[in-house]
Amino acid sequence: MRGVNADGRTPAPTARTAQDRPLLRLAVPTGVLAAVAGAFAYVGAVDPNEPGHYPVCPLLRFTGLYCPGCGGLRSAHAFVHGDLPAALQANAPAVVAYLGFAVLWTVWVVRAARGRPLRIDPRPAHMWAIGALLLVFTVVRNLPFGGWLHP
């Protein structure tokens, strides 16, 4: 008989995985996109240029130094409103990160739709290079001639 084990019992149905269900494979990337879109919508609606809406950067408040993230909310606000020059002026690495996220998310969706996992395996040299670029950005924006990088 078909579907019966050698001992005469019917085997239990196997659990279907996300690989078997195309829509389920896209659930996590869609959820991540919804969360990021919600955050950008909020920052686009609530202007970070007006005091009192967001907390002040603790490093800037206590030392007067700009961290690599200072201006990120202003950059996101300008980006949402389509003002790319203002977004780049507020925090250029943040704009690069937004675009990098868009590319990475697109690759993730395509791979998920094809039933393949997303593998991100940066080499240590890549991570050191990103860290070094952020360090240089932070140092230059805090020097007298780096005033054009202030948010």
Image (cartoon, rainbow, N blue to C red):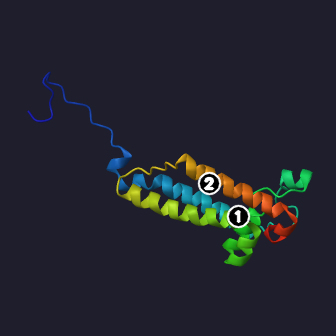
Q: Which one is in front, 88 or 42?
A: 88
Which secondary structure, mark 1? helix
> In the rendered view, does 91 fall on the left or right side of 10?
right
- In the rendered image, residue 114, in percent from the top left (x then y), is placed at 35, 57
Q: Which one is in front, 72 or 88?
A: 88
Earlier in the chain: of badge 2 and badge 1, it is 1
- Residue at 55% in and 55% down: 32
> In the rendered view, does 112 fall on the left or right side of 104?
left
Q: Which one is in front, 58 or 113?
A: 58
Is the C terminus in the top left, top right, bottom left or bottom right quadrant? bottom right
Q: Which mark is residue 129?
A: 2
- In the rendered image, residue 148, in percent from the top left (x then y), is placed at 81, 72
- In the rendered image, residue 55, in percent from the top left (x then y), is placed at 83, 55
- Residue at 88% in and 66% down: 144
How many tags in the picture? 2
Residue 2, picture quadrant: top left
Question: Looking at the image, is 33 positioned above or below residue 128?
Answer: below
- Kindly report the distance in space between the C-alpha atoms of the residues bearing marks 2 and 1: 32 Å
Question: Looking at the image, is 48 positioned above or below residue 27?
Answer: below
Query: Label 2 amino acid?
Result: Ala
**Residue 49 visible, this angle:** no
Question: Looking at the image, is 125 positioned above or below residue 142?
Answer: above
Q: Which residue is mark 1?
A: 42
Which secondary structure, mark 2? helix
